Amino acid sequence: MVAVQHLISPASLPNAINTLSVLSYNVLLPNSVDGWWNYKMYLPPLTPETLHYSSWETRKNLLQARISEIGADVVCFQEVAPESFEDDFQFMSELGYDHKEMFRRGRFRPATFWKSSRVEIVESPVHKDRTLLTSFNLVSDNLEEKKNWHVLNCHLQAGKQGSR
């Protein structure tokens, strides 16, 4: 049985034994090189005075603060851009996420980060149809038989191919 906890306000997750904490964000194509997508996601539309709210630098700082507060074992992002991935998400290594995997193709990619101090990868991640499946064991599992935790990071499709 898996217990699911939801955070309603900023708080750190308890570091309970034999549990895996996962955090997921769609970051609206944060590409610091090509951020055209995120501007259309703000309603009402941003004014010249408020346009800075949609900048990657502002959103990156908010993400970094929130992820730091929560301290999840695994963090999933959707809509990362391959052209600027390393630069855009450098802050994750500063937060202790020392391993990562990014989907192999497409413009809007999922990416998964994890802390090797908390989890170890069980097998190579599986890349298929806008999903990234990563399997882990907890480093601190004190069970005789370790159990696998599977994290499926998916960027949902909309529009004509939404049923895919």
Image (spheres, rainbow, N blue to C red):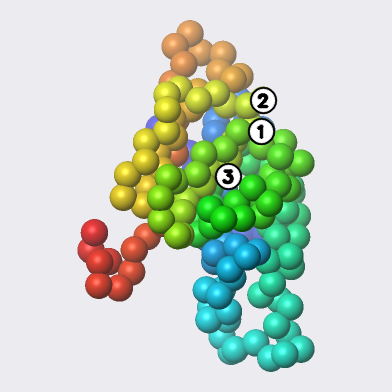
Mark 2 vs mark 1: which is more N-terminal?
1
Q: Which structural element holds mark 3?
A: strand
Q: Residue at x 60, y 51 (%)?
A: 85
Residues under labels 3 and 2: Cα distance? 14 Å
Question: Is the residue 164 above or below the residue 125 in the image?
Answer: below
Percent x, y of residue 75: 58, 44
Residue 131: x %, y % from top left = 37, 47
Residue ID for mark 3:
75
Disc 2 to disc 1: CB gap under 8 Å: yes
Name the residue at 52% across, 39% down.
101
The residue positioned 76% from the left and 41% from the top of the image is 94
Q: Quadrant of residue 161?
A: bottom left
Sequence-first tag of 3 and 2: 3
Regarding residue 5, the answer to whether it shows in the image is no
Which of the two marks, 1 or 3, is nearer to us in this view?
1
SS class of the residue under badge 2?
A: loop
Which is nearer the N-term, disc 1 or disc 3? 3
Picture coordinates of residue 41, whole percent (x, y): 53, 78
Query: Quick one: quadrant of the N terminus?
Result: top left
Read off the residue under disc 2. 117
Find residue 96 and report its horizontal and vertical position in percent: 72, 36
